[in-house]
Structures are given as structure tokens and as C-alpha cells.
Image: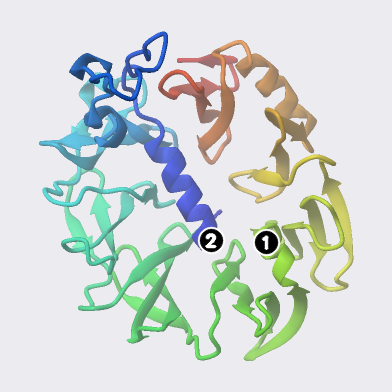
Amino acid sequence: MIAYRSLSAAILCALALGCAGRAPAPAPADSAPTPTAKTTADALIPREVLFGNPDRAGVRLSPDGRFVSWLAPLNGVLNVYVAPAGALDQARPITQDAKRGIRKYEWAFDGAHLLYLQDTEGDENYRVHRVHVESGTTVDLTPFPGARADLAGLSSDVPGAALILINKRDPRLMDLYRVDLATGELTEVLRNEAGYTEFVVDLQLKPRLVQRFTPDGGTEYLKLVGDKAEPFMKVPQEDTLTTHAYGFDGSGKTLYMVDSRGRDTGALFAIDMASGQAKLLGEDAHADVDEVLTHPKTGEVQAWASSYTRREWHFVDPAMRTDFETLAGVARGELYVTSRTLDDRFWIVAFDTDDGPMRVYRYDRENRKAD
């Protein structure tokens, strides 16, 4: 299951674009120049290093593991490349953007399509596009002038569909639509007339929770029951950035969320949707839970991370510990798991360091090898 929150999208975008395979910037001089000294060209970091396109970014695996994809420049503009797993030298661009470049994309769970966002001339009215992996045929799924769209959810339980947010009815509000990936047909799922800012969906792509702001600067979650939205949880203003829903398990009966209310740090909880009872899954006394790994098929929580002095991983599923111990010997740096196949055999892992480019590997869990 892949769901999207506005804050998460920004973080993931920053992480994806941090995967650049560039050489480190030149080392600074031993001492800073005096105010009257003239800085030489050799002492300056080239703007291209700081602001140019990454060599590669946003590495993903197809759901079945047959393909690897990434963002890379095509004629100086970021596009999506696809290659057979294990044969990266056969990579080919499957998008042909020549202007703004592509920054956000995902695999559809049908394995035949990729979905990506693109605006026009920087107007930030993003549209969701579907591209066929084999043919390269691209279709604009949200061709509405002046409207903005975004991905809202993908699920392996419904591989031929996606949820999309579009503000074509009212530019102030995003309505929720379901799109048939084969035909492009859009069906309205929820008309947002109450000012909802977030939709939390289950693995059947059914919206179960909605969120909106309250007059005091906080937020509230409401549970969708039939055509009604019932109060579920209120979050005061001071906890809004550290309290948020992650998603549901496969049964749809358990909600996973990070909650900092009444606590010093945001902790991970499993909440029974029927009774409202919360079970603590993990906490760090020094830092918020900032990432949660769930099984790509069942949606069950397997591990979580927090970052105090260094990033630390904690395991709900003991089998994950062995994988992370193996990966600790692959490269140095902070470890991120950025993509997984549906059978959970192959992962894309990234190691982030403060003195060089991010290193990305495909990890085979069965053979305990990373390449």
C-alpha cells in the first residue's frame, strides 16, 4: 500500500533528489580568507554541484521485481528511466519531458504502468500522467485546465486502480477520485465540501479517515461511516506536526499512527478502529518516530526508525533485524529502505552520508547480497 501525505511527499521528494551520484565538492581551504582577500574561482563550489540535476535519483523496483527505475537527465531534463533488474546497461527513458523535468513518480501495482506528476511551465497545477512501461505511451489522466492533481493512494489489492486528488470543482478543495488505469476513467469517490486536508485509505482504496484543521490551529480526524463523518480524534496545535496517521493493516481493522499528545516524543501506536483502544508499538524517549516500514502486501508494521544523534532502527518483526545487520556491513551512512517488491524478497536501500553522494543498492533478502 502506498498512501500520500503532503508533509511526507515533501520529505520523500527531498530524499529522492538527495540520491545524486555526484562527486563531492572540492574541500575548503585550510583557513577562511580575510574580508579583503579575493576569492579565487578554484575555491568556489560550482553552482552545478549545488543546484544542478542529480546523476540518478528516486530509484524504485517494479512490484514484481523485474525492473529497476530511476530519475536521470535526458538532454539536461530529469526523466524516468527503466532497466531490467540485473541489466542496468539496458536502461532506456520511458518519458520524454523537455522542460521542467519529473520529480515524483511511482509504479502502479499492475506492473505495466508508471504514474508521474508534471505541471506546465512552472504553474504548479500538477497533472497525473500514466506511462506504459513497454510501449512508452503516455496519457494525461487529469486533463483539466487550471486544476491541480496529486496521487492519493495505490494498493496491491486493487492493482488496476489509483486514487487521485483533483481540485477541478473548487480550486480551494481537493476531491477524491478513483481512476481505472487501463481506461483512464475517473469516478468520484468523495466530494470534499467540508474542508478536508488529508484522506487516509485502506488497502481496498476506500477512504476511512479524513482530517481537517480546527479554528484553534489544531486538527481533527473524522471516521467515515457510510455517508457520515464521525468525530474520531482531536490533535492540539502543538502536536499537529508530530501526530499523524500512517495507514491501515490488511484487515482494515487496525490503524497505525504516530501520536505525540501528552508525550515528549511521537510514539507509534496500533489503534483498534472498533473500540478506539491504542496499543503502543514503539517509542524513543529522545526523538519522534520518523519512519515506519510496513509489509508491502499486508500493510502490517515491521520496523520503525527515530533520529536522535544518529538514525536508529527498531524491529517489530524479528526477521527484519537480520536484514539490517547484514546491510550494516554493505556501506556506511544512514540507512533508508526506499522500495520493496510485493513478495518482499528484493529491496532498494540507500545509505546517506554527510561527506559524499548517497549510495543505492538492490538487496536480495534470500541470498543476503546487495549489488
Sort mark 1 into few (<14), some (14-19) or many (20+) by Cα contacts within 10 Å. many
The residue located at (10%, 36%) in the rendering is: 75
Answer whether labels 1 and 2 touch (C-beta < 8 Å). Answer: yes
Direction from residue 313 to residue 43 in the image, left or right: left
Residue 253, image x, y percentages? 76, 65
Q: At 67% from the left edge and 22% from the top edge, which residue is drawn?
A: 324
Badge 1 marks a residue whose secondary structure is strand
For the residues labelled 1 and 2, the Cα–Cα distance comes to: 9 Å
Q: Position of residue 320 (x, y in %)?
A: 71, 29
Amino acid beneath label 1: His
Q: Residue 113: x and y, percent?
A: 31, 51
Identify the amino acid type marked 2.
Answer: Arg
232 vs 5, left or right, is right
**Along the polypeptide, which appears first: circle 1 or circle 2?**
2
**Image position of 170 with respect to 309: above or below:** below
Disc number for residue 244: 1
Question: Horizontal and vertical percent for residue 270?
Answer: 80, 56
Quarter of the image with the C terminus in it: top left
- What residue would you read off at disc 2? 5
